[in-house]
Amino acid sequence: MPDKEKAAAAKAKGNAAFQAKNFKEAIEHFTEAIGHDPTDHVFFSNRSACFASLEKYEDALKDGSECVKLKPDWPKGYTRKGLAEYFLLKYDDAIETYKAGLKLAPEDATLKEGLTKASDAKYEVPGAGPGGGAGGGGGMFGKFDPAALATAAAKNPKIKEYMQDQALMQKVNMMIQLGQSNPQMQQTMMMQMMQQDPRMLEVFMAMQGIDVSTMSPEDLGGAGASEPSRPSPPPKKEEPKKEEPPPDNRTPEQKEADEFKQKGNELYKKKQFNEALEMYDKAIEKEPNEILYLNNKCAVWIEMGADYYSKALEALQDVIDRRYEINSANPGGASFEKVAKVFSRMAAIYEKKKEYDMAIEYYNKSLTEDNNRQTRNALRELERAKEKFEKDAYMDPVKAEEHREKGNEFFKEKKWADAKKEYDEGVKRNPKDPKLYSNRAAALTKLLAYPDALKDLDECLKLDPTFVKAYSRKGAAHYFMKEYNKALQAYDKGLSIDPDNKECKEGKEQVIMKIQETNRSGEVDEEQIRHAMADPEIQQIMHDPQINMFLQEMQKNPKEAQKAMMADAKLQEAVSKLMAAGIIRTG
């Protein structure tokens, strides 16, 4: 029975140790808590955080997964699991984890940030991934985050005004790029540019998340900084500045409409769809020239099922057609950003309908209105979904078998290339059939494409590890590549499954005879040696100190070396592999 009291006491100690950054000690306490009560998801969540702090992400993932398993409706568990997957470079898994968490808590900032980082890392956005910076700058000014600049512009009208100056922003972009390639040059040029144009400093400080709205010109190195120094006046007692909210220029109808929209959003989250629709309709009635209300209404229709898709598309297309009319009646009611959201909504509907080309078209339309990261990621995900859908739709085991049989007929007629083409189609139609990979490997062997044949045989054995014919064909491919040690291993594995298999028996005998023949000839086969030295297993054996001592002993005292080998099974096996590889010769 769980001992809740002892578990709580251990947890309290763990929390204290965690806050003191004694993560190893915290792990011990949380482990004790789990021992007292293994059903409490919080203990696994806390221990996962400790493991992550120590960069033990495999352990962090195990605990995060257990936390989600115990409490699948707890959003924080998904943040633990997603973080571990992110640092283990399992970006696809992390994305799915964060998405699952956001279904439970759509506004959770940690989950949103995690999803953005994982998506950026997956698509190799510069600076993304563990160890990457948030933005694209560098040098003495640290990392620049363009998103922070947008945030600053929303708060500070001065920054917003700067961003509208095309010449200034070109200089800023040039400095960011220079910081990535030559931080020293960036530092020199930045100093010169800031003397010429103090706005540069303000922009770059804003990109580092520093609030420049409260700084004086002297703090920013403005015009006063270049004047001769004067005696400082006595400090004045400044009264704290009160931040005034931006003026609300909405009409009474627009305010009321926004209230209806907010209520609709809350009902939508609760899946009270009919009630949400009622609120959005009231918002539209109050302010018909705001397309976001209709966009949200269509989101409800999408959740209500496929029967509403056509209705939603028709309504969304209508506001797109009237965008300029709407903007005339209510400036900003159909802004570029809002129209982009409508296009993205339409793309999402087409995606649900499996009309991928139309969905891609509408995501691209959205990007022409507002080129933002979220839409770019959605487009990439869609393109992958389309590829998978088309691949799955192409699969047909019956047709795959027809292609295999045609391939077999061509193979009997010694038309190896034609046989391979049929097997290629068969694999596309049914990539889970091991026979297709084995047969294609046989055709590739006849076409002297031994490495490709081995890849197919490995895939075949992955699907069916007991496929004896694949082992015999693998042995043959290694034999033709003069990798005799690997050929013997393949035949031995086949014989371990079927001791009476004729092909494996005869293949093994052929390899042994070839090894003996090579030893007797006394000639060095350069191709065989080259293949052997490229084999990681042979390399490992050659670096083994025991093997090196044995080889030295073979030269000095062959009888003693032979005696030592006969007494050591491991040494016998290693020597056999070196002989098969042509490294050791007895002739």
Image (cartoon, rainbow, N blue to C red):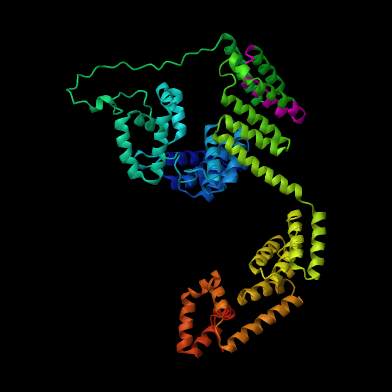
Residue 415 visible to an observer of this rendering: yes
Residue for point 71% across, 66% down: 441
Q: Nearer the viewer, residue 41 or 344?
A: 344
Q: Nearer the viewer, residue 173 or 21?
A: 173
Looking at the image, is 429 positioned above or below residue 39? below
* Residue 225 located left or right of residue 454: left
Where residue 345 sits in the image (x, y, percent)? 65, 29
Residue 206, by quadrant, is top left
Where residue 518 sits in the image (x, y, percent)? 60, 85
Looking at the image, is 325 positioned above or below residue 466? above
Q: Quadrant of the C terminus?
A: bottom right
Residue for point 75% across, 47% down: 393
The residue at the far left in this view is 231
* Residue 157 located left or right of residue 85: left
Residue 459, by quadrant, is bottom right
Is 134 in the magenta?
Answer: no
The magenta stretch is 286-310
